[in-house]
Image (tube, rainbow, N blue to C red):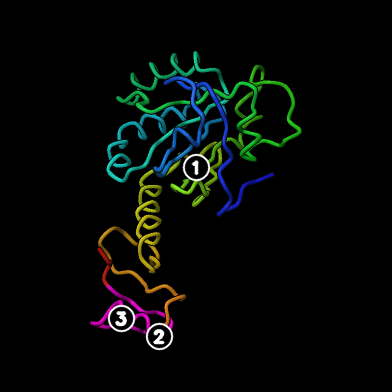
C-alpha cells in the first residue's frame, strides 16, 4: 500500500554499505532523506548519487541524514561507487541500502506487494517505480514524497529548498509561498487568527487580501 504524507515511515532492518542498520534507530532524532534507485549501474542514477554526495554538507548543516536504496546487493553498490567517483567526481558518502529481496521497496509501496522473486534478473524497467524521494521528520512521519520517471534526473536542490520550508514551518506558524527560498518573506498560517497574529507580529503584516498575510521570515 502506498505511503501518504503524515504516515509513519515504516521501520526495517537492512544491510548497507556502512553496516547493518535498523532504520528508525539510525535516524534517531534527525530529519532524514531516503531516495531509491531501480538498479545499480544505471546512467541517470549514477549522476544523482554523485551530485548527492557533492552537496551532502548542505544536508549536514540542516541536521538531515541521507540514505540511498538500490535493489541490488551491497557488493554491487561498492563496485558502482567506483564508477560514480570516476564519472561524477564524488563517490557516495552516505549509506546505500541493498534490497535484493525487494522487501523494502514493497514496504514503501514502490513495488506491488504481490511482486515475487528477487532483484536477480529484474531490469530497470521492471523496477521503474523505485525512483522515489522520501523526506522523514524527527517524529518518523513522512513529510514529502517525490516520484520521478526513469528519464528525468532528480532535483536535489529542490529537496533542500523543501527541507528549509519544512523545518521553518515546523517551528513557526507560517507557510511558504511559491518558489520561496531561505530568507524571503513568508505567509502567516491560516490557522492563526488576526488576534493571535497581532501578538506574534506586533509590527503588523502586508495583506493584499485578508487571507494573504505576509511577514518577514521569523528567526
Judging by the rendered image, the residue that carries numbered circle 2 is: 209
Q: Is residue 71 left or right of residue 204?
A: right
When asked about the image quadrant of residue 188, the answer is: bottom left
Examine the rendered structure and indicate whether residue 110 appears above or below residue 201. above
Q: Position of residue 134 (x, y in %)?
A: 50, 44
Identify the secondary structure beneath mark 2.
strand
Which of the two residues, 87 or 36, is positioned nearer the viewer here? 36
Which of the two residues, 57 or 200, is positioned nearer the viewer here? 200
Q: Nearer the viewer, mark 3 or mark 1?
A: 3
Who's the residue at 50% across and 51% down the image? Answer: 144
Q: Is residue 141 left or right of residue 18?
A: right
Q: Earlier in the sequence, mark 1 or mark 2?
A: 1
* Disc assigned to residue 54: none
Which of the two residues, 141 or 148, is positioned nearer the viewer here? 141
Could you give the CA–CA distance between mark 3 and mark 1, rounded to whole angstroms? 38 Å
The residue stretch that appears in magenta: 195-215
Judging by the rendered image, the residue that carries numbered circle 3 is: 199
When asked about the image quadrant of residue 199, the answer is: bottom left
Question: Is residue 88 covered in magenta?
Answer: no
Question: Is residue 198 covered in magenta?
Answer: yes
Q: How many marks?
A: 3
Q: Is residue 209 left or right of residue 149?
A: left
Q: Residues within 10 Å of mark 3 (few under 14, many from 20)?
A: few
Amino acid at each position: 500500500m502506498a505511503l501518504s504524507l503524515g504516515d509513519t515511515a515504516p521501520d526495517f532492518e537492512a544491510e548497507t554499505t556502512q553496516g547493518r542498520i535498523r532504520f528508525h534507530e539510525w535516524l534517531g532524532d534527525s530529519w532524514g532523506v531516503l531516495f531509491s534507485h531501480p538498479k545499480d549501474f544505471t546512467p541517470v542514477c549514477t549522476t544523482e548519487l554523485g551530485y548527492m554526495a557533492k552537496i551532502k554538507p548542505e544536508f549536514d548543516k540542516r541536521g538531515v541524514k541521507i540514505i540511498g536504496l538500490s535493489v541490488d546487493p551491497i557488493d554491487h553498490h561498492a563496485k558502482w561507487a567506483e564508477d560514480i567517483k570516476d564519472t561524477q567526481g564524488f563517490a557516495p558518502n552516505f549509506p546505500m541500502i541493498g534490497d535484493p529481496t525487494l522487501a523494502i521497496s514493497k514496504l514503501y509501496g514502490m513495488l506491488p506487494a504481490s511482486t515475487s522473486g528477487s532483484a536477480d534478473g529484474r531490469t530497470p524497467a521492471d523496477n521503474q517505480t523505485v525512483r522515489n524521494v522520501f523526506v522523514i521528520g524527527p517524529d518518523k512521519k513522512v513529510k514529502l514524497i517525490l516520484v520521478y520517471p526513469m528519464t528525468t534526473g532528480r532535483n536535489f536542490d529542490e529537496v533542500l529548498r523543501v527541507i528549509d520550508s519544512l523545518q521553518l514551518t515546523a517551528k513557526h506558524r507560517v507557510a511558504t509561498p511559491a518558489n520561496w527560498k531561505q530568507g524571503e518573506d513568508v505567509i502567516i498560517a491560516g490557522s492563526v487568527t488576526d488576534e493571535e497574529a497581532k501578538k506574534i507580529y506586533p509590527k503588523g503584516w502586508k495583506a493584499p487580501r485578508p487571507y494573504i498575510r505576509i511577514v518577514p521570515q521569523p528567526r
